[in-house]
Amino acid sequence: MNEVNAVHDADGLPLPRRYAAVAAILGAGVLVVLDGAIANIALPGIAQQLQATPADAVWIITAYQLAVVMFLLPASAVGERFGYRRVFAGGVALFTAASVLCALAPSLPWLVAARCLQGLGSAAVMPLGLALLRFTYPRRLLARSIAWNALAVAAASASGPTLGAFILSAASWPWLFAVNLPIGLLVLAACAGLPSPPRSARRIDVWSIALNAVMFASFVLGSDRLAVHPLHGGALLALSAVCMVLLVRREMPKAAPLIPLDLLRVHSFRVSIVASVCCFTGQMASLVALPFYIQHELGQSAVTAGLLMTPWPLAVMLAAPLSARLAQRLPSAWLCAAGSACFASGLALCALWPLHGNPALPIAVFTSLAGLGFGFFQTPNNQNMLLSAPKERSGAAGGAQGTARLTGLTLGSLLMSLMFGLLPSHSAVHWGLAMAALAALAGSVASLLRSPARARAA
């Protein structure tokens, strides 16, 4: 049996080096997720100290998100051309250096610019980390590696606000960014153990990168402004559509296009992308609606709201390793469909269950159900995306996965903005949760479009 496993492990790194590679990949993922999770809690204090309005302070978050979404796919292409390990380590180094600039920021424009640089570094880390997992682990253990990655990200998301509050209780806000320096240096040291897959001979098309950046920037900004400034938002969304058409026409003839059109022609990959967008739309819409529901309608404090939502990421952490084991025994299409259906059920119960008196127990149960479902969906869906792509296009697959996630998160935010703009607050949260449940259910239906035969092959 050990001899068989040794043969099957030939496509991954040997064990001593594999541990260093995993430490680098998971450490970098935790670094970028944790930074995003703890930055939100410091916005009021940063705005006050830098004499900025709350609306201007929001750009501390927006600038980071914009840089990530604009350069996810270009970073994947650059990784394929110049080497995954080199670009991944460069992203970690840029993120760490930009964190130091954030900590030293004397003004809001300085801080926003430094956050843009952090976003650039994060755009290299997110997709290439997923791609490097494919070269780190043998195929038979890939689901397990993706599950550990999901578990680490969920743990970082869950602990981020608490860690941020702990740091702020003992120090000023610059320390939220300064703590990234020792972590980043440790991750950089571990990057020496990363695999070095063969590079491609593709050309880097600067015009395509520019079109891609304008397309996603216009989409995010237009979506954000649509409810408040319909004309400005609509014009930006129209510009995004024009850039998309031009980009697709420019990239269509290429064997390895910037937008992975070659991968989207693969049925299983395309379905996984659609399912991912649907489920992340439901996740973001519900994460926006639930705090308003718990605090405004149920009259609970912000601390209580945070505690009631904590079971969600904890359930994701529990489900991720279990789903990895099940993915080796069950068709991934069925597992994804069941997980997203469970996710939808938790959100539907939040929207429809009549709550009164002490709502803590039912909400904790419902958010746990949603988290379990999302955890069981995410690991096999990401595994299918990676394995549906040729190994040399793993960077593009990782970039597409990250883009699908961010697209879903943007659509979820837009959905709740529209709900709050069109309906009273009481109705908006219930309709928002119901729409989030429908989006998750659409992800379940999309997952079933993969045939069992293809799912087993994945």
Image (cartoon, helix red, strand yellow):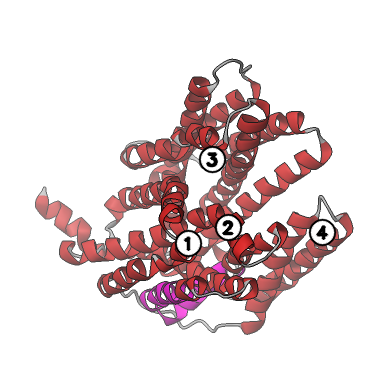
Q: Amino acid at mark 3?
A: Ser
Disc 4 and disc 3: Cα gap in Å?
32 Å
Name the residue carrying label 2.
45
Name the residue carrying label 1.
172
Quadrant assignment, res 313:
top left
Q: Closer to the N terminus: mark 1 or mark 2?
A: 2
Does residue 257 appear in the picture of this structure?
no
Between 228 and 150, the residue placed more toward the observer is 228
Q: Are marks 1 and 2 in contact (CB under 8 Å)?
A: yes
Does residue 118 appear in the picture of this structure?
yes
What residue is drawn where x is 56% and y is 54%? 40
Between 191 and 6, the residue placed more toward the observer is 191
> Magenta part of the protein: which range?
70-98
Question: Mark 2: which secondary structure?
Answer: helix
Disc 3 and disc 1: Cα gap in Å?
46 Å
Observer-side mark, 4 or 1, equals 1
What residue is drawn where x is 36% and y is 69%? 184
Observer-side mark, 2 or 4, equals 2
Badge 3 density bin: few <14, some 14–19, many ≥20, Cα 10 Å: many
Name the residue carrying label 3.
447
Q: Closer to the N terminus: mark 3 or mark 2?
A: 2
Question: Mark 1: which secondary structure?
Answer: loop
Name the residue carrying label 4.
233
Q: Closer to the N terminus: mark 2 or mark 4?
A: 2
